[in-house]
C-alpha cells in the first residue's frame, strides 16, 4: 500500500504539469487585453502599455510560462490582477464555501439516490422500478442552469420560502444559513442523485441473483436483512468508485450552481476572473481544482482497498489489478 501511494503521488507531478500547460495556453487565448480591462475604457495607451509591462505580459510566451512554473514550484500562485491580493488568500477564503456546497449536495444525493436504487432493484420490473428509473433518467439529463433558475423562480420569487442568492451567515442564525444552502444544494445534487440511483440499481441486480443471496432467503432470513446486510454490502464497491467521481464532478458542477445563486465559492471566483480577464486567477484556481481531483481519486482508491482487501495494487504500472 505504501509503495502504491508513493507511486501515485509521483504520477501526480506529470499530470499537474500537463494541466498547467493547457491552462496557461488557454488563458492566453481569452479575448481582451487584461491591462485594458483593468484600467477601463478611458485609460490612455501609455497607461495600458505601462501596466502590460509591469505584469510581464510583453514578454515572449515561453518566458511567461517559465516564470509561471517557477513561481508554482515556490508555492507562489501569484497575485490577482483584479482583486489585488494573493491568490492563495482568495482560495483559502472561497474553497471552504465550495466544499460546504459540494458536501451538502453529496449528502442529499447519497441519502436519496442509494435507497432509491436499492428499492428499484428489489422491486424489479414493477411500477416502482419503472418510476424510479424514469425519474433517474430525467435527473441525469437535467440541465443544472435551467433547474436552478426554475427553483429560484418558484420557491424564492413566487413562494418566498428561500433566499434567491447569497450564502448567508451563521451570525444571522443557523436557520437563515440553512435556507440559503437548500436551493443550491438541491440543484447541484440532482445529477449525482440520479447517478447513484442508477449505479446502485445496476449493482444490486447483479448481486441479488447470486447463489448466496438465494441461500440466505431459503434460510428464512428477513428480506430487509438480505437486501441491506448481504446484498448491499457486496454491491457497494462500484458505488464507491462512482462516489469518488461524483465528488470531483460536484466541484466542477459548482461553477454553474454558484453563478446562479451567487454563492461565493471557487466557481463564482473563476467566472468573475474570466469576465475581468484575470488570467492569473483562472489558471491558478483551475490548477488547484485539478490537484483536488487527483487527491480525491487517490483517496477513493485507498478506500476501495479498505472496503475490499482482496484487491492487490501494482506499483509497476501505478494502478490496480
Image: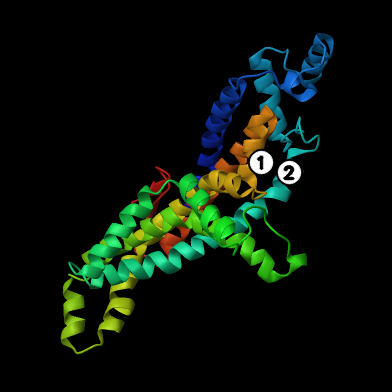
Is 243 on the left or on the right of 171, as rendered?
A: left
Q: Is residue 2 visible?
A: no
Give the camera-side residue of 287 and 97.
97
- Spatial separation of the CA atoms under disc 1 and disc 2: 8 Å
Quarter assignment of residue 104: bottom right
- Above or below, comparing residue 199 to residue 315 in the picture: below
| Closer to viewer: mark 1 or mark 2 | 1
Q: How crowded is mark 2: few (under 14 residues within 10 Å), some or many (20 or more)?
A: some
Farthest residue in the front direction?
Answer: 158
**Label annotation for residue 90:** 2
At x 42%, y 61%, the residue is 305
Q: Earlier in the sequence, mark 1 or mark 2?
A: 2
Is 241 on the left or on the right of 123, as rendered?
A: right
Residue 321 % position (x, y): 33, 51
At x 19%, y 83%, the residue is 217
Residue 106 % position (x, y): 50, 60
The residue to which callout 1 is attached is: 269
Farthest residue in the bottom direction?
Answer: 220
Secondary-structure class at tag 2: helix
Secondary-structure class at tag 1: helix
Give the camera-side residue of 162 and 245.
162
Q: Is residue 295 visible?
A: yes
Give the camera-side residue of 247 and 193.
193
At x 17%, y 70%, the residue is 209
Looking at the image, do the residues carrying marks 1 and 2 touch, with CB atoms under 8 Å apart? yes
Residue 117 % position (x, y): 32, 66
Amino acid at each position: 500500500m505504501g509503495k502504491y501511494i508513493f507511486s501515485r503521488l509521483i504520477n501526480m507531478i506529470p499530470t499537474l504539469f500537463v494541466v498547467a500547460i493547457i491552462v496557461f495556453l488557454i488563458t492566453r487565448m481569452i479575448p481582451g487585453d487584461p491591462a485594458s480591462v483593468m484600467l477601463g475604457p478611458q485609460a490612455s495607451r501609455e497607461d495600458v502599455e505601462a501596466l502590460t509591462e509591469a505584469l510581464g505580459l510583453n514578454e515572449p510566451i515561453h518566458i511567461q510560462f517559465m516564470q509561471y512554473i517557477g513561481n508554482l514550484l515556490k508555492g507562489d500562485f501569484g497575485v490577482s490582477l483584479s482583486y489585488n491580493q494573493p491568490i492563495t488568500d482568495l482560495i483559502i477564503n472561497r474553497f471552504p464555501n465550495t466544499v460546504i456546497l459540494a458536501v451538502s449536495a453529496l449528502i442529499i444525493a447519497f441519502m436519496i439516490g442509494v435507497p432509491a436504487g436499492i428499492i428499484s432493484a428489489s422491486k424489479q420490473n414493477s411500477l416502482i422500478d419503472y418510476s424510479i428509473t424514469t425519474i433517474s433518467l430525467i435527473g441525469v439529463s437535467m440541465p443544472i442552469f435551467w433547474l436552478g433558475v426554475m427553483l429560484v423562480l418558484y420557491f424564492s420569487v413566487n413562494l418566498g420560502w428561500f433566499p434567491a442568492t447569497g450564502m448567508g451567515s451563521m451570525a444571522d442564525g443557523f436557520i437563515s444559513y440553512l435556507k440559503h444552502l437548500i436551493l443550491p444544494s438541491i440543484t447541484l445534487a440532482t445529477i449525482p442523485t440520479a447517478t447513484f440511483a442508477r449505479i446502485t440499481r445496476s449493482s444490486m441486480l447483479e448481486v441479488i441473483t447470486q447463489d448466496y443471496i438465494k441461500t440466505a432467503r431459503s434460510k428464512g432470513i428477513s428480506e430487509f436483512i438480505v437486501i441491506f446486510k448481504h446484498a448491499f454490502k457486496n454491491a457497494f464497491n462500484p458505488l464507491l468508485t462512482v462516489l469518488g467521481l461524483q465528488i470531483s464532478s460536484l466541484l466542477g458542477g459548482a461553477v454553474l450552481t454558484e453563478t446562479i445563486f451567487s454563492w461565493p465559492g471557487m466557481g463564482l471566483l473563476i467566472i468573475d476572473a474570466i469576465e475581468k480577464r484575470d488570467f492569473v486567477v483562472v489558471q491558478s484556481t483551475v490548477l488547484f481544482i485539478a490537484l483536488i481531483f487527483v487527491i480525491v481519486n487517490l483517496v477513493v482508491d485507498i478506500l476501495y482497498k479498505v472496503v475490499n482487501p482482496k484487491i492487490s495494487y501494482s506499483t509497476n504500472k501505478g494502478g490496480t489489478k
